[in-house]
Image (cartoon, grey):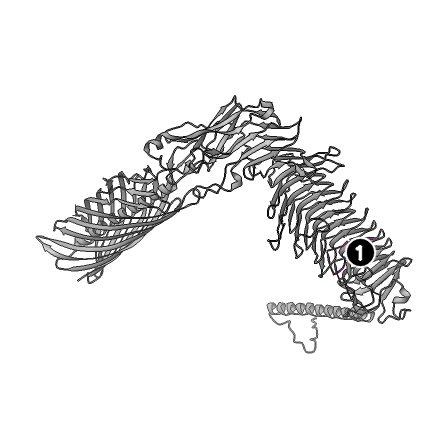
Amino acid sequence: MSSSRPVAPGNDDVSNLPLLWRQSIIDNAREQAERDLTQRRRKTLYFSVVTALVTGAMARPAVVQATDYKDTVTGVADNDRPGGAGDYDPGYDIADENGTLHYRFVNGDNVALEGVDRDVLAMSITSGKPPVVLDVVGGGWLNLSAVRPESTNRGMAIGILNDGNTVTVNGNTRISTNADDADFGLGIGNGAHAVIGRGGSTTVFNGATDFHARTQGFARAVWASGRSNIVFNGPTTILAESRGTLDAVYNSDGSTITFNGDTRISALSIWPSDNAHAIYNDNVNSRLTVNGNLSLTTVAAGSTAFGVRNQGDMEVFGDATVSVTGTRSTHGIANTHRNAWMIWHGNVDVRVRSEGPENGYAPFGNPSGLSNDRSPGARMRFEGAVNVDVASEAETYGLVSTGFVEFTSPTAPVSFTVAAACNPPNVPNCDRDVYGVRNFGTVNVAGGLTVSTSPFGTGAAYSIWSVPLDSQDASVAVNQAGGRTVRLDGDIATATDSVNGHIGSVDLNFDTSDSWLRGLVNGRQTDAGFTVGKADLAFANGATWIPEGAGTLANDFGTGSLAIGNDGAIDMAGAWGRFVPGTVPAHTYRRLLVDSSSTGTGASVALADGARFMLLSDITGKAGAVSADQIVFGSGITSFSTRGTQGVGIVYDPVLDDTSWVNAASIRAGRSIPAATPIVIVDASAAAGGSAAFSAVAGRNGQWSGTYENDLVQFTYTPQVTLTDGGKKVVLTGINIVGAGSGTDVDTGGNPGGDPGGNTGILPSQTVLSAADAADSLVNLWMADAQDSPQHLRNRLRDSDADHGQIWAKADAGEITTETAHSRRYRQDYRGMTIGADRGFALGTGAGTVGFSAGQLRSTADYAQGRGDLTGTTLGAYGHWSAENGAYLLLGASASSLQNRYAARDSEGRDIVGKYRTKAGQLYAEGGRSFKLAQSYYVEPQLGLSLSAIRGSDYTTRNGVRIGQDELDTSYARAGVAFGRTLQGARLAGNVYVRASALHYLGDNLDIAASKDGGSIVPDTSDRKGTSGEFMLGGDVDFGNKRTSLFLEASGATGAETERRWAIQAGLRHSW
């Protein structure tokens, strides 16, 4: 029995549909069901969100508007909330949570108070009340402001006053206070303050802070007193401006201020003003800590200015920058109490400027970068790099200290730049002394130290001053572990306390090649007399002592010592500037006295093997009297010791500029120039009770980068020195110039300083070498032109028709490299254009052609020390004969005008300029025969001869050197073979070919001579003699009418020392 399922109304029976159709309908139904389910889920989520939003809207408005509050926050809930006793409108949203009052704010809320009463406070919290918390719900900024317009009633504008309570701000806080007081700050009862914490209170800011306090009275943007505690947990910016007393941050009475974050503090005075401090940490046991980077700016428009004035404890863990500007006493960082201490863990940069109409008036201490001027006990410690830059119109200090200062990093550099001035400069008695380090206590620099000093007028410059008080010794120690750069520009002074015998001392270690002392070592002269302490100085490894001054330079080491180690030096020349040939600085000859006035004890001198004395001399009296610098070790040197050999270097002598001795013989054998009279240059006869003596001395090679250079030659020179008086004196007897044929190195003892590679003999100067290169490159240009001319003609004239005239033009380009004498090399490129015309005629069974040409080549040569611009202009005539059997003969002649304008620099940077002009001529002949091969190929042997020469020439360079060039034979012979194929088509015809040639140079090498003041030298030039090879690839094409053709050739050539790396000729010829 069969049964059937009724069909649903509206639906057709699909049972009879094909299987694939039925499956498609089922899949579509399933997909639609899934879409319906997704839609229902979306609707459910929509209604859930709407429900949540409606519920939230009923609890709090969806958009929270900022509120402007006009009443003081007092910390009394019943007074401050809506409907409270204070009748605040609006009142504050306050919640009491476990005994703490939480004031709830939102981003942008303002607590703004304004009035002319005695005090205007945005927030005033006193003791005996619950702790107060200001919550900025959802983050953002809370703004508090207190404004007092101009008023005759004295009073203060205060952002937050916390008197004995606990206040916490959770969120970013911006506080602005302004008091426009009419008395301009004449009393301390008026002013503007962002935050005051007193009476043992605690105030904490959890978030960023931005405080600004401005007033005509006195301003303390942050003020802690009475053992209170203020903490900033976030980045902080503080600005205070006032005419009265100005402390951007003031911490006193044993209070604590902590900045946990990068902090920027500025104290900017409004003229006229009183004292200004970015940070004033007042009173013993007050503590200020910065856990982050610190930036301080102080500007005083009237009186004293401090970046930091510290009497308590202060510690900064990040890097710090301090900028202080004032018109009177101005200080960067200062400890001003005997028990004060501070530690700076990061790098510190201090800039101090003191200048103004009062010109040097400094009633509260002379300007300083670092001031630790309280003793005993005041301490400063710097653990990073320190850079201090101070300039003022008064006596100026980089560091002044009567306490203890230490720079503990062995690697971080420490530097002081100190300058004084007068403005206007014509003020009477305006001489200003400057001090890098002015020490009355203890200063220790673990690593390197740089001091730069610039006094004004006749003021003194001290790099280090170490003078004791009557209660303590004074000491400065620098680079005791060694290996760091020490550069001190200024004198060193020590002294002894005449009352209690306390000693001032320095212990300085100069042991790197870039370390030096520019100044003298001495004691201190006062109205009570002269005293000296103890100066211990050591120089080694290229470090130098450069005494400054004129005449006799007296030095007093007291009970100290001078040690010159290996390659350490006393440099008597360095004070005058850099000695460069041709620009030698003005100088005089001086006497350096190394001595001690400390009777009994005296000082000691120790000279190691390789210790150097670098001097100036005039051994022949060329610049005046025979003279030289002199170093004297006085009778106060009670201990004098030497080891090995000490070296003597003559930095400069006028005889070195003499060129009259230069000739072939002296270049080969060298030159010994005796002193007109022996000169005592080092004298130790009075030292060690007359027993001091040298064991050995030797001249050192010249101090000019290994060689000295005058206008004609470069050379190594060595002073000739000897010991006399039982080794007590060193005498200069002459200067020896080592010749090219001498291999003797007279420099002995110690590390060589003048010529690290030994003596190289006498070489041509850069003036002479540049002149040789200039002439040589002009020969290259001429040879390129002389070889290119036959190259073009030999191919094109062979197929010329009788009774036809032709005109043609070609362009040339190429590059030449040349190895010259003394391991020099230069490169030059050239390019040019030539035009010509000729006429064909019948000659027996063959054909002949005669013609002429005119062209110019230009070249740029890059020499070792300069550049040349070269030009060659050529006129030529030629003739060609070709026979029916393929033989040909080419004859030609040309004349050229050559010029090279060149400029270079010598090894010391002096300009060398020359203009070289000459003439050249050429006769050439070439013959060959073409042998035809199968398929239009051919082979063609060739022989050629060129007789050519360049005329001699003379000219004078800008620095007075006369250059003479002899006539130069540039003849050559050529043998080659060409292999090619003749192409013949309906519209085009031509040839392609390759050619290999051997060129044998028949002429001479270039000879030039340089002379000046009776001396002369003939430099070596590049070697041209021998056989070179040339390879060429070329072709030409005639157009259908055979009257116009194009040609192209590319070639390269090698030689003994000259190589034509590439050359191209391309041109056009037309006949009629």
Depth check: give the residue in front, 958 or 521: 521
Q: Residue 557: name its quadrant.
A: top right
Q: Relative to residue 970, is residue 498 depicted above or below?
A: above
Residue 362 position, x and y percent, is: 70, 51
In the displayed structure image, the side of residue 995 where residue 705 appears, left or right: right
Q: Count of labels shown? A: 1
In the displayed structure image, the side of residue 234 where residue 798 appears, left or right: left
Asked if residue 445 can be seen in this view, the reply is no
Tell me which segment is drawn in magenta. Answer: 229-244
- Amino acid marked by disc 1: Trp
Name the residue at 63% across, 67% down.
23
Q: Relative to residue 513, is residue 834 depicted above or below?
A: below
Helix, strand or loop for disc 1: strand
Q: Residues within 10 Å of mark 1 (few under 14, many from 20)?
A: many
Q: Which residue is mark 1?
A: 223
Magenta stretch: dominant SS?
strand
Q: Does the segment drawn in magenta span residue 596?
A: no
